[in-house]
Amino acid sequence: AAFSSKATAHHTSRLALMEEAASKGSDDAQAALAEIYFMGLYDPEAKADFAKALPYVQGCADRGSASALNMLGLIYKEGHGVPVDLKKAENLFRQASLKGDFKAQSNLGELLDPHGKKKSRRIEAAAWLIVASRQGEPLAVYRTNELQAHMDSKEWNKATVLADEHQAKIQQK
């Protein structure tokens, strides 16, 4: 028990130093705190604290961080401390996707719904999942294998062409 209280005190003091650095404008400290609070990494028994994460995530997203844009998209998609806003989540995932973030590409593909009723969204969803799967994102690899087996071949071919177009845009940035 004594060890765990020492470890918790050590975590708390490091966290306080990071928060101090973040308050003085350190982008690195803000990015670290965004991830720490978003993932619940600040204490061995902690859970995600989206209320604490949100200002750090928002600040990093405002500076164009792809991973923060993806995290913010997840916050809005799931309604973690904010009202659910799927349009905002889609926009954030799209911004991060165009910066090359494979997690955001996979999240965007899922949000666009590759099994939905609207053909153009199905194709775009599959395209983003293809882009993410080409980078080895595990869920996207699984989903693209599933889609390729069940999707109409014309739609699959359109999705593949669109994925190539998306990748060309990402490489230009």
Image (cartoon, rainbow, N blue to C red):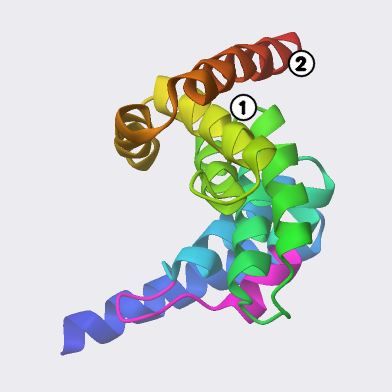
Work out whether 152 lies above or below 5.
above
Under mark 1, the amino acid is: Gly
Residue at image point 59% right, 32% down = 123
Picture disc at residue 100: 1
Q: Are marks 1 and 2 in contact (CB under 8 Å)?
A: yes
Q: Which residues are magenta?
A: 42-56
Quarter-of-image position of residue 83? bottom right
Left or right of 94 on screen, residue 128: left
What percent of the width, then of the height, locates residue 55?
75, 68
Left or right of 124 on screen, residue 114: left
Q: Secondary structure at mark 2?
A: loop
**Pick the front one: 24 or 91:** 91
Q: Residue furthest left?
A: 1
Crowding at mark 1 (Cα within 10 Å: few <14, some 14-19, many 20+): many
Residue at image point 48% right, 23% down = 156
What percent of the width, then of the height, locates residue 118?
65, 46
- Residue 49 in sight: yes
**Pick the front one: 98 or 64:** 98
- Mark before the other along the chain sequence, 1 or 2: 1
Q: Is the N terminus in the top left, top right, bottom left or bottom right quadrant?
A: bottom left
Residue at image point 48% right, 48% down = 115
Picture disc at residue 120: none
Picture disc at residue 173: 2
Work out whether 24 lies above or below 165.
below
Q: Is residue 43 magenta?
A: yes
Q: Kindly report the distance in space between the C-alpha atoms of the residues bearing marks 1 and 2.
A: 9 Å
Under mark 2, the amino acid is: Lys
What percent of the width, then of the height, locates residue 68?
66, 50
Q: Is residue 156 magenta?
A: no
